[in-house]
Image (cartoon, rainbow, N blue to C red):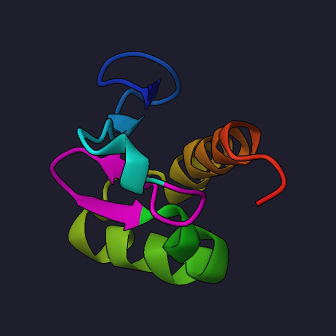
Amino acid sequence: MSYSRWGGRGSGHWYTYWVARIDEENEDRDAAMFCICCVASFSAKELRDAMDLCMAQVHEIDPKGDVAELRQYAMEFLEDIDNEYPGA
């Protein structure tokens, strides 16, 4: 699932998505991956436990992007993860 695409929603700077795993049986609430295309990927657990650190890492790699906007996409991803894996 895509949260933002180049030239699309928001600034159009970020292309972010929930990485589809071939071995879905190994994906869970913590292992689901959020990808920032050409920049970085973080697990849902990493984002929940250290969102600020993850955003700082992205800013170091790509200082032109709006990290506040990126944080919004990451939060949408976490909300989707919570909906996909309720009660976890």
Along the horizontal axis of the image, is 29 left or right of 33?
right
Residue with the most extreme right position: 87
- The quarter of the picture where the C terminus appears is bottom right
Foreground of the two, 63 or 40: 40
| Image vertical order of residue 29 relative to residue 57, above or below | above
Q: Quadrant of the N terminus?
A: top left
Q: Which residue is drawn at the image coordinates 34% and 68% (left, top)?
A: 58
Viewer-nearest residue: 32 or 37: 32
Say if the magenta span includes residue 19: no
Q: Which residue shows up at 48% across the image and 70% down it?
A: 55
The quadrant in which residue 14 appears is top left
Side of 67 relative to 14 (left or right):
right
Residue sitting at the far left:
38
In the image, which residues are magenta? 28-42
Where 61 falls versus 23 (above or below)? below
Q: Residue furthest top?
A: 8
Depicted 85 relative to depicted 60: above or below: above
> So how many labels did they put on this image?
0
Residue 35 falls inside the magenta stretch: yes
Q: Is residue 15 above or below residue 37?
A: above
The x and y percentages for residue 75 are 67, 50
Q: Residue at x 33, y 49 (%)?
A: 35
x and y percentages locating residue 70 in the rendered image:
51, 49
Residue 76: x, y in percent?
66, 40
Name the foreground residue: 33 vs 66: 33
In this rendering, would 24 be left or right of 48?
Answer: left
Q: Position of residue 10 (x, y in %)?
A: 52, 27
Residue name at image x 53 percent, y 56 percent: 28
